[in-house]
Amino acid sequence: MKKPIILFASLLFMMIHVTSWAQWQSVGSGIASSPRQIFSISAVNENVIWAVANHPTSLKSFDFTVSVDGGLTWNAGLLPDSIGNYYPGEIFALNDQVAWVLMISIPDQDKVRIFRTSDHGSSWHEQRGQFNTARFAFASLHFFNASDGIAFGSPGTGITFIDSLRIFRTSDGGDHWTRIPAQTLPAPLAGEGVWIYGDNRYESLGDSLWFVTRASRVFRTTDKGLTWQAFNAGISGNSNYPGLASIAFKNSMEGIVTTYFPSRAAVTIDGGETWMPLAMPSTPGAADIQFIPGTSGTYVINEGWLSSGNTSKFLLTHNSGNTWETTSYTPVIPVLRFLSPTIGFAGGAIFSKGSGGIYKWTGNFATSTTTIAQTNSMIDIYPNPLKDKMQFSFESNTMTSGSVAQILDYNGRKMIEKSITGNSGVMDLSGLPSGSYLLRIHSKDQIHLGTIAKQ
């Protein structure tokens, strides 16, 4: 008896061109304080860009800036500076008038303060909550609309209780924040917080949001933070940089997660519920990953705020992580925000009001990256249930000479591998323990991904 047809993601690679990463132009920032560096960017569209800056050594700073003409001119200012030792951890903007800034305490990072503007930064009003109290800090915030927002994570103190994951939610634009009870969340693991490696430690699409933790889990909500699920990604950094660093999704189903050191990556095709390891260079550190909207599978990775020296090193894939190329840019631009293949912004050290600071992308990933034709391919797997063998056949003859079928566990370990030709094959499962596995089929110009379960 055949198992019901399973849907696999199939990628057909057509042509590859080299991308020049030197296509960045400094547009300044309007910030005169020195020394300063752009720490977070919120690009609402190609014209409206907000950013905050911190001090490169002490972190303490209250500088923000906003442009409404794509970076041609800037309106820089200061956040309320009478709150003591704090630095801006993140800025999130809805439009040219409304934005929120998360301020994190120094040096303990164990409490935070939120400020909101509704008049283009002319005035800022504090939004209070339990997170103003020591040991209740979080690491990041996001708004789905003018009313519904969430804040999540924890500081990186090394103290288990302080670092324990917490999530807050608001439904009135931040006037009131309520902590989601721990007992209603997936059971938090010890010290499970969110590393602040770069600006892309979470991803949001529509009502869904994903964020990554130091315990190698991906948290997901599909209802603007009301309910949550957690899934293990199966990869982790070393003991100095444990867990996951960053996450990016190209749509609601397909995404990539990374670790910082050594660099590792895993891909999902089911919204983050299951993950399959990707082969990638172990350096540079994959602290910050972002999908380029408007492309079929272009992601860029950089070292985020763990960059060293005067050069940013990047990893670039045009085929959803199946192959990677390395490139670099001088000076360092740790913060990236792409809106399309031709619209992007980056942030780095501020040299003066008109130089450094914010950089604008002048390239075009639509013409300088891999062209990918993405299709959906059906495959029949039988018998049902799977026991000692698995037979499979494609709806059309898409396999080529040299094709390989692999079964992997969820830690990425290869359990079975078999060469196949034509549009069908048989795999011996007699030595495979019962459980769920990843099925990966490589042909010359396609990759098929899916899951199977053996009884």
Image (cartoon, rainbow, N blue to C red):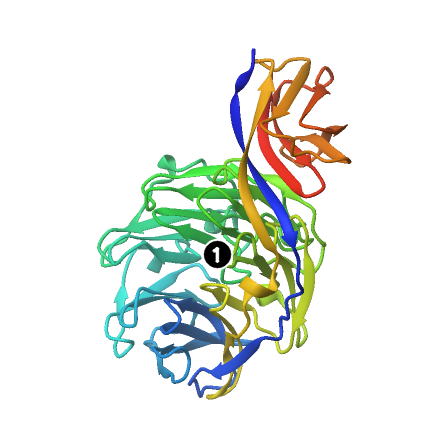
Q: Is residue 22 above or below residue 448?
A: below
Q: How many numbered marks does the figure carry?
A: 1
The answer to whether residue 192 is visible is yes
Q: Amino acid at mark 1?
A: Pro
| Image quadrant occupied by the C terminus | top right
Q: Nearer the viewer, residue 418 or 261?
A: 418
Q: Quadrant of residue 301?
A: bottom right
Q: Is residue 78 above or below residue 278?
A: below
Q: Nearer the viewer, residue 437 or 3?
A: 3
Name the residue furthest front.
Answer: 397
Q: Nearer the viewer, residue 191 or 68?
A: 68
Instruction: Determine the secondary structure under disc 1.
Output: loop
Residue 206: image location, x then y, percent: 35, 49
Residue at x 58%, y 60% (from the top left corner):
300
The answer to whether residue 234 is visible is no
Residue 428: image location, x then y, percent: 73, 18
Q: Quadrant of residue 284?
A: bottom right
Residue 423: image location, x then y, percent: 67, 27
Residue 147: image location, x then y, percent: 24, 55
Name the residue furthest top.
Answer: 1
Mark 1 burial class by Cα count in 10 Å: few <14, some 14-19, many 20+: many
Q: Is residue 275 left or right of residue 88?
A: right
Name the residue that disc number 1 marks: 155
| Image quadrant occupied by the N terminus | top right
Residue at x 57%, y 13% (from the top left corner):
385
Q: Is residue 337 above or below residue 446?
A: below
Q: Is residue 286 left or right of residue 116?
A: right
